[in-house]
Each structure stands twice: as structure tokens, then as C-alpha cells.
Amino acid sequence: MHDSAIFRSMHVARFEAEPAIYVAPGRVNLIGEHTDYAEGFVMPAAINFATLAGISPRGDGKIAIFSENYGQVRYFDAAELPSAASKHWTDYPLGVMATLAGMGNAMPGFSLSLWGDVPLGSGLSSSASVEVATALAVTGLLGVDYAGPVLARLCQRAENEFVGASCGIMDQFISANGAKDHALLLDCRDLSFKLAPIPGHVALVIANTMVKHAIAGGEYTTRRAEVEAACAVIASHRPEVRFLRDATVGDLEKWGHEMTPNSLKRARHVITENVRTVAAAEALIRSDLSELGRLMAEAHTSYSQDFEASCEEADAMVELAQDLPGLIGARLTGGGFGGCTINLVEQSHAIQFQERLAELYAGHTGIVPHIHICCASGGAHRLE
Ligand code: GLA
């Protein structure tokens, strides 16, 4: 995570005011992909890559938003914030402000600085971390205290309705509610969750394929539509099925022939992934790491073959990890079509694993990957 003392002095130098500072982490998902918007299960962990948000009040009725990452500042009238996205990085913080305003919070003038080290476009939820950091900073300034799940929902709404990306609740939820040294089994139906401790001897090795992933528009949206179409077929026979969370493999055997071949495959992934995710949480809770690794391998195959959300490079990264000493389980994590793989690795092997995987991947693809040894971190909070 970036240094908050440096961040503070940057904010003071630019805006001549002492900021309150908040932090919101990115995340890695251990298992449970494209299940959140089907009201199913996911098992992410917050990680030690994060966005810092610094905020201080202003007297001129303006909202200044500065991004250290983009080296850019923009000014808006607090009383007249944009009501639509403009395909600019400010869409994320502005979406949060618009959502907060829609909840009855009048926006005062303030200066907001943002600085993150979550790699952009790599499937580690840099966007959610910006949203949650912004939401905490602005509500902190307003003196409004929303519970973690409420904060997560409002940030998801900002992304759905303002930014225009049809994401589920996972990323914002884990950023707001993560727990140090734990993964969280989240039921995306009612947002209840169970903590699953990650043993101290297990490292989260996150391997960036360097293939960019984007969830606004494109394949993510197509997959979601295919999942929803499959659900509608099942619901036409069993009206109690509102989401694929309620469906079974038996439903696919009965009515799969009424679906397009793609919808059928996507639905098979989601339905089996829900079962795997709950089983994986149970395995982690009882420290059955070989079962967890087996489920992760199965999940990757399903994500790659049935959901077709992987890519050659991510498949290679997962494949190349298989024979390396210390591996517990590996799979592509996040929205898909590039981004990172998550490798659970015995801590004692983590450094050699990191080096060897980088060499093998570069040799195989010609791309130099970024591989990070991470740990599960706490959720968003005020720093100072
Ligand atoms: C992205 C979305 C999440 C989730 C994952 C896939 O990260 O933001 O809501 O759907 O993809 O599991």
C-alpha cells in the first residue's frame, strides 16, 4: 500500500488543507466467478493493494477531484454535479457522489485526492476500491455512518447506474467488509457471510497475465445476458427460480435443450460454481487444502471451457503453475478475459514459486508478468 504520510503531504501541498484519510482495498476472488449477479456465492479476500482517499472541506462550493495516478485534477460545482458518465476516470468518484446525493445527502464543497496501487484493468477491483474509498471519505466528511453492506450497495449502484458497468456486488462488498487473514464466503442473495481463515502458511500469489481485462460493456455483459436467458428458460417451467442460484444441474438436463448452446454452458458453469464455492469454503474452514485446490482446478476448467471467460495466457499461467512445488490451487480470478490468476501457495515456497512461474510464463508467451505475493487484508477504514 502507498505511504499515507506522503499522500497527506501531497494533498496539503495541492489543496492547502489537512485531509482526513481513508483506505479501501482491492480484492482477489478465491472461487465463485460470475455467480454474484445470479444471487449465488463468492469467496473473495481483500488484499494489500488499495486506494487512499484524502478529503478536506472547501469554502468555494467546488468539488475538486485529484488523481495522483492520472496526475490530473478536475473541478465541479457541488450544486451541479454531472448526471451522466463521460468515460473519464472521474466517473467512479462522481458516480458515488451522485448516488449519495440521490440518497438525500446534499454535497458540500470539498477537495478529494485519490492514490491507488491496485493494478488497473487487472481484475483486482481497482474500480471498487476507488468507489469505496470515495464513499467512505465523503460520508466521513458529511458525518454520515453507513454500515459496510449499505456502503457496498451504494458503490455497486454507482457503477451500475452511473458508470454503466453491470457488475454484481462482490467487489464493493469485500472492499468494504474484508477481514485480515480471512476470505469471506458471501451469500449474494442476502449479503450474509461467513469468514474462512487463511492459514498463516498459505500465501496468495497473484500472477498478472498482463492481458487487460475490462468489465464495462463487451464480454462481461454478454455473459451476464446468457446467464439470465438460461434462467428465464428454467423459470418458465419452475417460476420459483428467480436466479440461477435457485436452479440445479437437473433443471439443465430437463430444459437445457430449450436454451442456446452458449446459454446452456454458461448456466452449467454458474450452477456448478455455486456448489463448488460453498464446498471450497467448508474445505478452507476445516483446513482441507488439497480439497480446496481440487475445487479451484475444477472451477478454472469450468470458467475456461463452459463459461469461456479465460484466454490463452491465463490458461497457460494456470497450467504452468501446476507442477511447481508448493502449489495448493490455481485459477483465473475476477471478471475474466485476462487479468490475474490466484495461486494459493505454501508460504515456504512462495518466493521460488513467484520466480519460477515468471520465467516459465515469459518463456511460453513472450510476456513478462507481474507476480505479487499478497496477504488477506482488512476492509476499508479511516487511517487518520
Ligand atoms: C467482476 C464484477 C463482479 C463479479 C466478477 C465475476 O469483478 O465486478 O461483480 O461478477 O466480475 O465473478
Image (cartoon, rainbow, N blue to C red):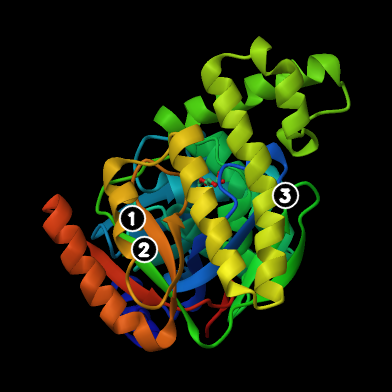
Answer yes or no: is residue 115 visible: no
Q: Would residue 22 be found to the left or right of residue 231 on screen?
A: left
Secondary structure beneath label 1: helix
Residue that appears at 39% across and 48% down: 90
Q: Are marks 1 and 2 in contact (CB under 8 Å)?
A: yes
Looking at marks 2 and 3 on the same chain, the residue that comes earlier in the sequence is marked by 3
The numbered mark at residue 342 is: none
Task: Identify residue type, mark 1.
Answer: Glu
Q: Would residue 326 be found to the left or right of residue 154 on screen?
A: left
Secondary structure beneath label 3: loop
- Label 2 neighbour load within 10 Å: few <14, some 14-19, many 20+: some
Would you place residue 198 above or below residue 211 in this image?
A: below
Q: Is mark 1 within 8 Å of ligand 1?
A: no
Q: Would residue 76 be found to the left or right of residue 180 on screen?
A: left
- Marks 3/1: CA–CA distance: 30 Å
Q: Nearer the viewer, mark 3 or mark 1?
A: 1
Q: Check the image and name the residue furthest to the front.
A: 323
Would you place residue 25 above or below residue 312 in this image?
A: below
Residue that appears at 75% across and 68% down: 194
- Label 3 neighbour load within 10 Å: few <14, some 14-19, many 20+: many
Q: Which residue is mark 1?
A: 319
Q: Which residue is mark 2?
A: 322
Q: From the viewer's side, name the closer residue of 14 and 203.
A: 203
